[in-house]
Image: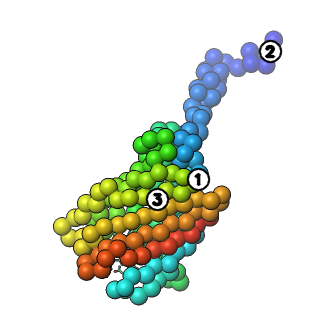
Amino acid sequence: MDENSTLSPAHSDAAASSCANALPLPSVPDALAPFAGLWRGEGEGAYPTIDEFAYTEEIEFSPTGKPFLAYRSRTWEVGSGRPLHSESGYLRLVAEDEAELVVAQPTGFAEIHRGQIREGIIELSMVSLCASPDAKPVHSIRRQLSVRGGDLTYDLWMAHDLTPLTHHLHGHLRRD
Ligand code: HEM
């Protein structure tokens, strides 16, 4: 008698169903694979109309098993730990080497950017910016995102009110 034959039918059913529930890890499209994961680091912000500031940041690009990664960023003020900006959305593969970043901000903006992925760098161009009636007067946003090995860096420029497209953020995070 083999050892499994000592299990009651109920026990062997439970064992079979727990194996069936062990889902495989979601797959990630090759071109998006360098971005997938949890990243932690810091950033600096500036703009002609405000004081410079420093922040810590956590970014997650989570595999979903579909041709996109779920995106989430949270930031905190250095020193006080006070929550600053956060945003979330998706990094979608729209062609073999082309990605689209869809982002929603709690400050009342929804953005769509697209760009070619070349060796882990996505130079994004804004496709669309929607603003809530009470959002600040932001006219355009430019983003760049790059991954080299275990380092993720990004830059963000914006045109706000009377200021033309000007650098606002630089972030540098490491794979957790
Ligand atoms: C890492 C993410 C970000 C951080 C840590 C951050 C932080 C800040 C801080 C500390 C200020 C100055 C205080 C304030 O007005 O609240 C500020 C101003 C501002 N930020 Fe950001 N920000 C981030 C991302 C963004 C993004 C994605 C946008 C795009 C719409 C944006 C748009 C603005 C605007 C319009 C202002 C006001 C500028 C002014 O009043 O002249 N920020 N940001």
Q: Residue at image x 41%, y 88%?
A: 51
Q: From the top left corner, tell me how far across and down residue 19 is, in percent.
A: 63, 29
Q: What amino acid is labelled 3 in the image?
A: Glu
Q: Quadrant of ligand 1?
A: bottom left
Q: Outermost residue toward the top?
A: 1
Q: Position of residue 27 (x, y in %)?
A: 56, 38
Left-right relation of 122 to 152: left
Q: Nearer the viewer, residue 139 or 38?
A: 139
Disc 1 versus disc 3: distance between alpha carbons? 11 Å
Return the residue at label 3: 123
Nearer to us: label 3 or label 2 = 3
What amino acid does circle 2 point to?
A: Asp
Label 2 residue near ligand 1, CB within 8 Å: no
For mark 1, what is the residue? Answer: 119
**Do the CB atoms of the residues marked 3 and 2 lie less than 8 Å apart?**
no
Residue at figure coordinates x 42%, y 58% from the top left: 124
Q: Residues within 10 Å of mark 2 (few under 14, many from 20)?
A: few
Ligand 1 closer than 8 Å to the CB at disc 1? no
- Which residue occupies 54% across, 52% down? 118
